[in-house]
Amino acid sequence: MARERARGAAASNQALGMPTDSFCYDGDTLLCDGVPLADIARAEGTPAYVYSAAAIEGACAALEQAFGGYPHRLHYALKANSTLAITRLMRRLGTGVDANSVGEIEVALRTGFLPDDIVFTGVGKRPDEIERAVALGVHAINAESAGEIDRIAAAARARGGRARVAVRINPDVDAGTHPYITTGIRGSRFGVPIDEAAALCRRIAVNPSLRLVGLHVHVGSQIFDVTPLRRAAESLVRVAHGLADDGIAIEHLDIGGGVGVAYDGGASLSAADYASAILPVVSPTGLTLLLEPGRVIVAPAGVLLARVIDIKGGGGSAAIAVLDAGMTELIRPALYGAYHRIEPVVRRQGSQQEYEIVGPLCETSDGFGGARRMAPLEVGDVLAIRDAGGYGSAMASNYNRRLFAPEVLVEERRWRVIRRRQTIDDLLALEE
């Protein structure tokens, strides 16, 4: 049941440089768009994810405004968060989607997207995934290799049709980010080396089972400097000009995603700066521009609520606060050493002290951060782990037979559960 609490919220969060009324304090109480997070934690328990629809809308609006004067379309990257209600919200906002699996394709279809709204990406596509994408007639299959192109052609030929294909180019551009999320350097498993791309495109152009519709690039995630994004776009444009000289016309240039989120609360790359770096490069071609934002839209729009279940140590060293959430709910700190801000849902007065914030799993890496200073914590306190709207629930697991946490969406000062907490019967339903 939706609940409402009409209280004011001051602008505090930023998505793509656009202020949004999302997570901020009213006195000592942390709100999401006017709704006290303590109310949600009390009603639904913890761990729990909470998302702001207004923050998602604001991030999309910022991108649309920045690129609005040039033919373009946002294809939201479902891998960041593909919960049905979030996906439906993106459809309502007029985006397309970028899918990385047949499962994400099916999510898109179930939430009302049409095949022409879907771009199918992924470094390794199974035969059944290729067949499904070809049968649907998705807007583009971003092909990763010559072998994959042959498999797409075979699937199209078997159906007596033509598949719409874009070639993913590896431009040998270092995104300058974490090595686990850098995808555009030579020798990585992503895309076709740029010096082989033109020849491959010519092969596609003469294949009666294929239609070359675009060029695609994605050089990594968490990018704050426009330079690698601009260089990647320049690589696409050079290949596009070469194809045009050969009489091969394409429809679009897909520059992927990758704009970073400032998890420390600092300034992100603004939508205006992003557009001003890309549009001068792309606009001379006249080709439609596709963008695949994911994290930058949903990460700042979500928090993970977790309760303190034990406190250890202290004295001469940092105390250890054990939460009921861990790497099963937010794996980024354990996987990447990622930083997330942590704030009390209800602030307590008192001299700040240092805490190491950890999860409950039997893994030394299961933690959210050390040397965090805050007023004294007590068992039962609820904390909000910020910027968990992207790659939180999407990367959650049932390790230790832990149950998936519920997800809550706040919209127009009302909140509702968009995915209930998993039960043990749900977890075991597929087992003998």
Image: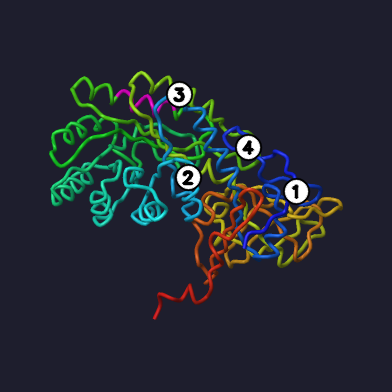
What whole-number distance in Å separates the C-alpha atoms at marks 3 and 2?
Answer: 21 Å
Mark closer to the observer (4, 1): 1
Dominant SS type (magenta): helix
Position of residue 195 relative to residue 313, above or below, is: above
Earlier residue among tags 3 and 2: 3
Q: Are marks 4 and 2 in contact (CB under 8 Å)?
A: no
Residue 51: x and y in percent read 59, 51
At x 51%, y 44%, the residue is 295
Q: Quadrant of residue 308?
A: bottom right
Residue 224: x and y in percent read 54, 33
Which range is magenta? 230-238
Earlier residue among tags 4 and 1: 1
Q: Secondary structure at mark 4?
A: strand
Question: If the image is split into quadrants, where does the N terminus sit?
Answer: bottom right
Earlier residue among tags 3 and 4: 4
Residue beneath disc 1: 7
Residue beneath disc 2: 92
Query: Viewed as shown, does residue 3 lie left or right of 318?
Result: left
What whole-number distance in Å separates the C-alpha atoms at marks 3 and 1?
Answer: 37 Å
Q: Amino acid at mark 3?
A: Gly
Mark closer to the observer (3, 4): 3
Earlier residue among tags 4 and 2: 4
Closest to the observer: 339 or 380? Answer: 380
